[in-house]
Amino acid sequence: MWNREGPAKDDRDIKRQDTRQPGMIQPMGSALSAEERRPVAWVGKSVVFKGTLTSSEDMTIDGHVEGSIEVRDQGLTIGPDADIRADIVAKTITIHGTVIGNIRAGAKIDIRATGRIEGDLTAPSVVIAEGAVVCGRVNTLTEESEVAKQPRAQLAIV
């Protein structure tokens, strides 16, 4: 049947239409590996959180958090607009924004050029990009390592 826009569409034409709208997130197919499909929690820019924030999945924070953040066996990303006033514990931590508090990672702390930290860092691996600001102690020795049984030498970066 004809209408003003042209011929009517049958079911096959409707199924082929691209129903995506700009800015919408579409579900991914099962072609992704389990690692790529791992859920990520996100705290947006307009969110203000006070208290203990705990997650058992990877997390990205772009908002304001006061208190403590625990993402024990997962990764945590602090976005460039984030303002964190909390102690942080996670497996890996990537910092693009501002953190005031002590940070402890089980594997690695990666401070990007826009990162600003006021507090002590403890992790087996710490990466500080050129342009990043760190005011506190950096400790790359962990209790699990044999070297940790020896007297600790700490480096203060200002």
Image: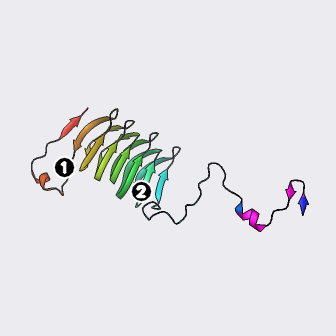
Label 2: few (<14), some or many (≥20) within 10 Å? many
Residue at point 37%, 41% (across, down): 99
Q: Quadrant of residue 19?
A: bottom right
- Report whether 45 appears left or right of 103: right
Q: Where's residue 130, x and y in %?
A: 32, 34
Secondary structure found at label 2: strand
Q: Quadrant of residue 6?
A: bottom right
**Res. 90 in view:** no
Q: Residue furthest left?
A: 150
Secondary structure found at label 1: loop
Task: Say which amino acid is labelled 1.
Answer: Leu
Q: Where's residue 101, x and y in %?
A: 33, 43
Decide whether residue 13 is among the magenta residues. yes
Q: Where's residue 86, x and y in %?
A: 36, 46
Which residue position holds label 2? 58
2 or 1: tag closer to the N-terminus: 2
Residue at point 17%, 41% (across, down): 154
Q: Where's residue 145, x and y in %?
A: 16, 56
- Report whether 21 appears left or right of 116: right
Task: Say which amino acid is labelled 2.
Answer: Asp
Which residue position holds label 1? 141
Decide whether residue 158 is among the magenta residues. no
Q: What's the magenta region?
A: 3-15
Camera-nearest residue between 119 and 50: 119
Picture layout, residue 84 above or below residue 76: above
Figure quadrant of the C terminus: top left
**Res. 26 in view:** yes
